[in-house]
Image: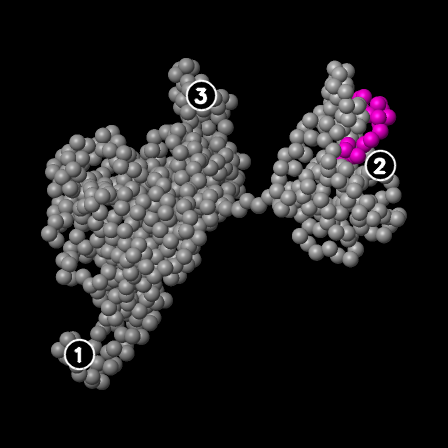
Amino acid sequence: MAKTSPKTRPPSKSPVNGNLAKSPKIKTQKTQLPSPSIRGRGRPKKSDFQSELETPKSFQDVKIEERKSKGSSLKKFKEKLLGSGDSIDNKNKVKKMRKSLSKALNNSIMSDEDVGSSAVPIKRKARQSLLLGVNLSSKEFINSKTLKDSKSSLRVLLGKVQRKKKQSNSETDVSSYGKPPKRPKLDIPNWAFPKTSPKAELSKNVGGCGVKTAPKTVKSSKKPPAVPITTSKQQKPPTTLLRSSSTTSSAWTRPLNEERLGDSYLEGSKIFDYLIQPVTSVKFFRDIWEKKPLLVRRHNPDYNKALFSTSEFDKILRENSLNFTENIDIVTYLNEQRETHNPDGRAHAPVVWDFYQQGCSVRLLNPQTYSKPIWFVLSLLQEFFCCMAGANVYLTPPGTQGFAPHWDDIEAFILQVEGKKHWQVYEPRNESEVLPRFSSPNFKSADLSEPVLDVMLEAGDLLYFPRGFIHQGKTPDDSHSLHITFSVGQRNTWGDLIQKMLPRAVEIAMEEDVDFRTSLPTNYLNYMGMAFSDYETESRKRFTDKLKTLIDRLWSYCPIDPAVDQLGVAYLKSSLPPCLTEYEKECSVFGNGERWSESKGTVMKACEIEPDTEIRIIRRGSVRLVSEETVSVYHNLENARVYEGSESKCIEVEHEEAEVIEFLLNKYPEFVLVEELPIQDLEKQMALAQLLYNRGLIATKSPITSLDGDDDDDDGEDGDDDSDDACCDCNHVNDDDEDDDGAV
């Protein structure tokens, strides 16, 4: 209880509920004892206790009046006003009095004469009403016109008083200070974050397993060890209902429902943020990427559940034609020996499950072909990383291991979906194995040092390790394991760019610079070569100095942009087609336009591009303008949903049309009017826009209205394509998958 200031009186018992309250402000009028004004949950205003009052009553007088008020009840009230008789007339009068008294008291309290302001908190009004009611002692007031016209019930108010009286007197009376302020809701983005704000804490030990550094002989051993991160509370991703399905999905696939066309690069960054959270992407690429492993414990088995499941795996096997080696691998690892048990032909579900029952691990090589959530995530990750993004699904029975220790040539993100798996991760053994360009052979236990990470991965957890880090995983005896490996960064390095650039740079230099065409010295073979490398002569010095000069000048002839375009074309060839949202389909040729009407027996919903139609490139990373012998537009919109399942398509364009493509690429993600395209002729603008729309390269800002004015499908056919291959051919499979490529 707050200390009493010199300008205030001591607190007293409230006549309403017996709890401690501030002393009321007392005026010379004897008809009312108004409560002090309330300022939230703070102290009373000083103005309530100023000396403007005339001859205030003493503290004892106030206490006497409060005791009288506190002791009043319905029975005493009846005795005061109607006598103690129990006649029927008296009981009827009591009933009428109950119905009328409350409204009259409230009306009196709300009047300016009694209170002075109508803006009084509800709880204060009720308290003042009861205070005035128990202090009434005149029958004339009851018989007044105000009471006769009132219809409110006193029982409700008296019931509140009785409930308040039962409260402990030791509790502070917060009712007189109004309701406590509501806690503001956290403004958490709905796209990728769970409802519970994740809190990360760094720890040196994960699951009882210590994190150790690699030998000092390895350059990377000077870097910090793996970063285990544990989220302290269970995090459940928000779920939304997909428009094209009756199932719910987590934030992994939330944008499938959004009725807008965003920036595909930013959407990919949000997916990546959700993949690694609570670690931020800034911290990840600064401290972890290509340097050390990362472990994230989420304590939420449902975090990755929306992506895949064992039951979905079974459904895929039964409803699709999957072949061993092409789509399914059956593997074991026993006595430090890895074996593949793939038979020929189709992978029928009973055959696959029989292998599983015998202790074999099952690997699905291209889950994105059959799983829309995985396809959707990969299509955005490739937009973010600007390189191919792949996935494998691994199902391992309890107490088994499917693959030998090895390293991969990709950046691996392991998402544990079901069960558990014990992982051991080892640093590269020497400098040459740091960030390798190709996968390793299988290792024996004798080839390995102590692991830098030894942990049991559980459902919902994430494990990342760079390429070159040796790893192996085994399930415990009491649990199976289902995990997905997302992979990026395969042969997407500075060296790969230079390989594309230097050969062409030399060709250009020899064409334009005569010094590159001059002859070598007549006797250079007599002092240059391995046999002469240990002897420093003047001839060797002149030779190497001349070569350094030419190499320095070679930089000015390096075709950087054409070399990047070559990598871009290679990326489009290996990339997945974009997994379009439902709204993207409605705004493009993949979901809008002509269709057959069964009831009318004709083609309906004819749509055409108009001069005021707003358009843009459908996805940032799906279209590339390349200048070769001719100018071509490469795209991945017709790619298959397997690795290099079909050749990327290209469209040859004229110089004037190439300027339009360049204009649209630089304007992305903004929309532009067709009549604003950099072509003078309106007919050419319309024709080129219609061509790009028909090939699926552009989307409109909103769905194009049908020319026949009938946008309703009278045959009950939805304009959305519910199939998962709305913009690609998913019937092809990759015949060139290597047995160990991407094995994790």
- Mark 1 residue element: loop
Q: CA distance from mark 1 to mark 2?
A: 116 Å
The residue labelled by disc 1 is 533
Label whose residue precedes the other's in the sequence (3 or 1): 1
- What secondary structure characterizes most of the magenta part? helix
Residue 246 location (% of width, % of height): 39, 29
Badge 3, how many Cα within 10 Å: few under 14, some, many 20+?
some
Give above or below for 102 relative to 357.
above
Q: CA distance from mark 3 to mark 1?
A: 80 Å
Residue 350 location (% of width, % of height): 17, 31
Q: Nearer the viewer, residue 408 or 581?
A: 408
Label whose residue precedes the other's in the sequence (2 or 3): 2
Residue 31 badge: 2
Q: Quadrant of residue 595?
A: top left
Give above or below for 500 relative to 659.
below
Magenta highlight range: 131-149
Badge 2, how many Cα within 10 Å: few under 14, some, many 20+?
few
Q: Nearer the viewer, residue 612 or 728?
A: 728
Residue 713 badge: 3
496 relative position to 138: left or right: left
Q: Nearer the viewer, residue 137 or 561?
A: 137
Q: CA distance from mark 2 to mark 3?
A: 74 Å
Q: Quadrant of residue 145?
A: top right
